[in-house]
Amino acid sequence: MSAQLTLVLGGIASGKSAFAEGLVRQSGKPMIYLATAQPFDDEMTQKIARHRKARGPGWHTIEEPLALAQNLREIAPGQCVLLDCATLWLSNHLLAESDIEAETHALLAAFADCSSDLVVVSNEVGLAGVPENALARQFANAQGRLNKSIAARASRVILVTAGLPLTLKGPVA
């Protein structure tokens, strides 16, 4: 099992990624950034560039929109991995029409097998109303199940709202 699995939840632009990056920096271990975003348009390309610049040096970045389980198995022990984010990973698989249940099972198994600390960022989508269309409802339900599965396995779960962390499970960060 990983040395520690931490889940950092929050809404869009809540400060969850910056908070998670701080946790990884505080670990004092070699830092790996496992990025799931895909630059489909200029806005996302610019956002990725801003995030990369804000992180600064010292990070080894792996850009992988789908095959997180495989990448986690290849990470050497004793590092600290930031997976940002599980929400985009799930969206990527939904759009690719993957078997979400099988992919989620593989990802959770990779978390259990990883011998490095993991900090997983994910959006909390359950605070909004019920989506109007079937795809959005499918996504919201799958995201809720994914977040609950990760939280059940995590030793620490933190909700970030307006840049402020609230510890839901485990030691205060």
Image (cartoon, rainbow, N blue to C red):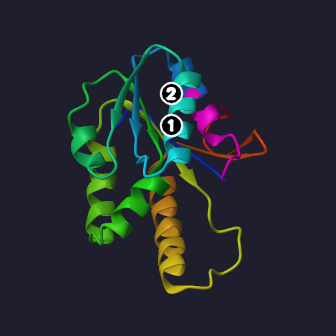
For the stretch drawn in magenta, the main secondary structure is helix
- The answer to whether residue 150 is left or right of residue 110 is right
Q: Is label 1 in a helix, a strand or a loop?
A: helix
Q: Nearer the viewer, residue 172 or 49?
A: 49
Residue 115 against residue 38 in the figure, above or below: above
| Residue 16 lies in the magenta stretch | yes
Question: Where residue 73 sits in the image (x, y, percent)?
Answer: 22, 39
Question: Where residue 124 sits in the image (x, y, percent)?
Answer: 62, 59
Q: Which mark is residue 48?
A: 1
User: Image quadrant for the C terminus?
Assistant: top right
Q: Residue at x 34, y 45 (%)?
A: 111
Stretch in magenta: 12-21
Amino acid found under the numbered disc labelled 1:
Ile
Question: Where residue 15 sits in the image (x, y, percent)?
Answer: 69, 40
Disc 2 to disc 1, C-alpha distance? 6 Å
User: Image quadrant for the N terminus?
Assistant: top left
Q: Residue at x 53, y 17 (%)?
A: 56
Q: Nearer the viewer, residue 109 or 60?
A: 60
Residue with the mark numbered 2: 52
Q: Is label 2 in a helix, a strand or a loop?
A: helix
| Residue 15 lies in the magenta stretch | yes
The answer to whether marks 2 and 1 mark residues whose Cβ atoms lie closer than 8 Å is yes
The crowd level at tag 1 (other Cα within 10 Å; few <14, some 14-19, many 20+) is: some
Q: Which mark is residue 25?
A: none
Q: Residue at x 34, y 49 (%)?
A: 65
Residue 61 against residue 149 in the figure, above or below: above
